[in-house]
Amino acid sequence: MIDVAKIRADFPILGRLENGKPLIYLDSAATSQKPRQVIEAEARFYAERNANVRRGLYLLAHEATELYEAARKKIAAFLNAYPEEIVFTRGTTEALNLAAWALGETRVSAGDKILVTEMEHHANLLPWQEMARRKNAELLAIPINKEGELDLSAFHKALDRRTRVVALAHASNVLGTINPVQEIAEGAHKVGAVVVLDAAQSVPHMPIDVKELGADILAFSGHKMLGPTGIGVLWAKGDLLGDWPPFLTGGEMIREVWLDRATWADPPARFEAGTPPIAQAVGLAAAVEYLETIGMAAVQAHGQELTALALEGLLARPFVEIYGPRDPQKRGPLVAFNLRGLHPHDVATLLDQEGICIRAGHHCAQPLHRKLGIPASCRASFYLYNTSDEVEALLAALGRVWESMR
Amino acid sequence: MIDVAKIRADFPILGRLENGKPLIYLDSAATSQKPRQVIEAEARFYAERNANVRRGLYLLAHEATELYEAARKKIAAFLNAYPEEIVFTRGTTEALNLAAWALGETRVSAGDKILVTEMEHHANLLPWQEMARRKNAELLAIPINKEGELDLSAFHKALDRRTRVVALAHASNVLGTINPVQEIAEGAHKVGAVVVLDAAQSVPHMPIDVKELGADILAFSGHKMLGPTGIGVLWAKGDLLGDWPPFLTGGEMIREVWLDRATWADPPARFEAGTPPIAQAVGLAAAVEYLETIGMAAVQAHGQELTALALEGLLARPFVEIYGPRDPQKRGPLVAFNLRGLHPHDVATLLDQEGICIRAGHHCAQPLHRKLGIPASCRASFYLYNTSDEVEALLAALGRVWESMR
Amino acid sequence: MSPYEEVILDHWKNPRNKGRLADPDLVGMEVNPLCGDAVRLELKVKEGRVTDVRFAGEGCAISQAAASLLTELVLGRTLAELREMKDEELLSALGGVIPTRLRCALLPMQALRKALKTSA
Amino acid sequence: MSPYEEVILDHWKNPRNKGRLADPDLVGMEVNPLCGDAVRLELKVKEGRVTDVRFAGEGCAISQAAASLLTELVLGRTLAELREMKDEELLSALGGVIPTRLRCALLPMQALRKALKTSA
Ligand SMILES: Cc1ncc(COP(=O)(O)O)c(C=O)c1O
Ligand SMILES: Cc1ncc(COP(=O)(O)O)c(C=O)c1O
């Protein structure tokens, strides 16, 4: 059990009003709010330790570099990974672009196969489309079933020796579905394919141990896990990174440079061209520290509790249609739904009048919405600072929205 | 004239000690320090307005989006550009990688020519090396003369109808040299080449009007101009961006997405895949506002004054060798030098004992150092918070370093 | 609780001039790629004046109500007048629209401007 | 003002065992790509014991003094002993090295380890 009241006191924004009502923020899947510990860690960095990293020989620069590398170690430990396996990026999107590009360069030839799924966020679909096009490879999407889960038999059927990469969401940002990574990785590894996980919706919400997970590559964003915007992480197992050519080039990722050619530094530096998001790495480390203090198992349990409550309430309302698995244990802490006959935008606007912030749209998953046969959906998503009262408030307000629009 | 004492009071880090001595920070060319106005703008964003941008229909998200787009407008106005011409990136390095990639896709074929210069930072050299290799184009570096200035006759000779891109530093991060952009752009445009400016060392230090400058593309970093790490800007003139395919793909840069293909949003969104550095854009806008309040002409005059003082003092010391033009009017606010027979690392370490932070190394310009015939150099760089007393302290300390190592 | 004025709810539930014209003189279509809202406007013009109008579309209450209301506003006007027509006229006819939804409300105006562009 | 102990200045100005061996048994070379500092260590070994040693290199005072001092530390020792040799021994022989420059001071140790790897 977590002490939500105590946690809420750490988040200054939760004291704000939204349209004159106390803010009920149910859009953490888009971006999470930040505790003062994170805001202050970044501010303190600028006020006390700010210098560029890796280059300076003076004490201040040495301290900045130590803080930046300590952040890498902190995140590695959080995932049970090694610091050398951690590359800082701007976010999940850049991490997946980097991975798709580099895997294209090193592992994919014409006629090879890349598997994704029908539930992917555009960030884990478009980079593979681009790579497949560039390499004349075939891109195939594993279908989902009626419950919004992956069709595993279709996956196993699609898998063959030509399959070089299997890229999928760990947890869907619309359906909530948590995909069975171990089973997928086992199958993929048998045919020699690499498994890339879009973990943007899982790392913030559950304990992750990359040694157990089975994936080879993992991408996630700082801003969805209490951290700053402008930073994300690419984790790649063992010495996978060692084979990759650089994605961006410039300062700090080189060994030696001539006018006409250059040689590369070892990973992770090879993939961090230019000045990295230094203060943001420090802020992300503070976010991880905050999450560790609460405990990821507790964070997950709280999310499941709120999700169960929301699912139950939504299922009890005949004017609501929900998407994804009905079992909260099979989900991340979010629920997408629609009120029959109402457009999600109108629902979001009306809820906002009551101070309730949810998201409405295609959530960067147009192919999934096309599959579901809807142009858009509403999504409520929860995090450690949300309360069951807030979920109840959402449910009650949905009733009023429905009434007011009949 | 600027009121340096008043300015210094805005920078919390300047109250810090370095090795027990008052901090004398002379490494702003690597990264600048931040005034509390910037630190607080970011913190306030997280505490009061944090939401993801472009997607949300609730008030909070609307406010966040307005702040993000207001930052774009602010930066556009600062450069006398249009907001649609401004793309937010992680920094100069990413901006130049994007430009090199996109120009390669749209304007360069086998046998074409790309011109750079011998004084480039790796960030404005390696991306062109990669692009030239990919496109089988020829990469040529315009030489510098003894004074550390571009050999313009060599430039005009190298320029021909095959030349598609001329990429150069606006101000060198080692020599300080400010390159004659107007003359170069005039020549380049005559043969139909595009001019790309690495403005990392100019935008922070002088008034910039892109309508007068003559370049087609400009890249710079927020962290070198009082702003946060993790954000930079790519400016591209008129509808140049409209022709470019996206560099990174993912959410928020699309028009429509299917499982096997996608269409792109208009610029600048097309080049901002995924969640952008939102709080950092807000912080950068606060930095620009701070600089505007002081006035860029005043910032530049102050930098030239300190540089003149430093040059004079260094030239008066027979044990010092300096690089780049001797005329402070021809320079950005930095000076690279060596003490004869001493390694720059030792000089930096010994200065640091007196609280003076300078940089020592190749400053991400190995080819330039090779040309100068030195493995590395010391560099002192100045900004609006530095005083003439600090410059004098550097000069005096250099004498002691020289004595202590004889 | 509604930020939706009666006029919006009314036009949304009872859309005016919804459908297609047999032989329109001007047609404009606009889509909001962020949300999929779409509005198509068809005009019949005689001697420079709108004599008939229809809209088709799908999307949120605001965009659809705005489209319906716009058809009433354009009927009987000259093309010259419509070229001068300001966003504000539609917005105030809607009883005002909150900032977060301006885009939805103005989608039909964009469709109208596209339609006008197709005329010489 | 110097963080450089006498021992560093002494070895930097008067390097011991600088140069090359005619016929070294073990050779190790290490470069710091960030600053260009380089150290090359050559060892003559008889019956598992270092009987002669030279270093060559260029770079800052700390790396070159450390290399010079290291040649004195290895002379006469067995390869087995050298394999056990800790960074701390060199650092304390140097009178301590500030954190910002540890990399420079330890460059010769890395050259030594590379040299030892070339022996069976
Ligand atoms: C001239 C020049 N270009 C490019 C860069 C790279 O900027 P960043 O590291 O912020 O990407 C720098 C700064 O290091 C620079 O001085
Ligand atoms: C499943 C998933 N993948 C990728 C992303 C993209 O993350 P970012 O925008 O931080 O790059 C998101 C968040 O929007 C997401 O939910």
Image (cartoon, coloured by chain):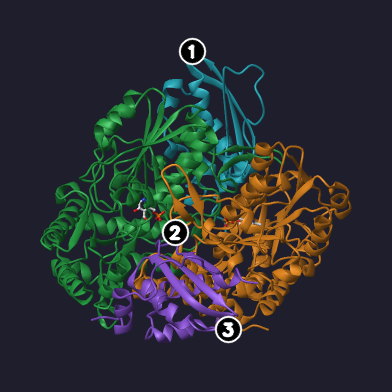
Chain colours: A green, B orange, C purple, D cyan
Which mark, residue C84? Answer: 3
Q: Is residue C44 above or below residue B18?
A: below
Instruction: Say if labels 2 and 1 share a chain.
Output: no
Is label 1's Cβ within 8 Å of ligand 1? no
Which-is-in-front pick, marks 1 and 3?
3
Relative to A127, A22 lies left or right: left
SS of the residue at dot 3? helix
What chain does badge 2 belong to?
A
Q: Quadrant of the C terminus of chain A?
A: bottom left
Where is residue D85 drawn, in percent x and y? Answer: 42, 31
Where is residue B391 drawn, in percent x and y? Answer: 66, 70
Q: Residues within 10 Å of mark 3 (few under 14, many from 20)?
A: few
Say which residue appears at 57% left-offset and 84% top-offset: C81
Q: As shown in the figure, which amino acid type bears the numbered disc 2? A: Gly
Relative to A302, B317 lies left or right: right
Q: Quadrant of the N terminus of chain A?
A: bottom left
What chain does badge 3 belong to?
C
Q: As shown in the figure, which amino acid type bears the numbered disc 1? A: Glu
Q: Which residue is mark 2?
A: A230
Q: As shown in the figure, which amino acid type bears the numbered disc 3? A: Glu
Where is residue B308 drawn, in percent x and y? Answer: 75, 71
Which mark, residue D47? Answer: 1
Q: Which of the pair A322/B245 is nearer the observer? A: A322
What chain does badge 1 belong to?
D
Q: Is residue B386 above or below residue D76?
A: below
Identify the image quadrant of residue B168: bottom right
How far apart are the two marked residues, 2 and 1, measured between alpha carbons? 59 Å
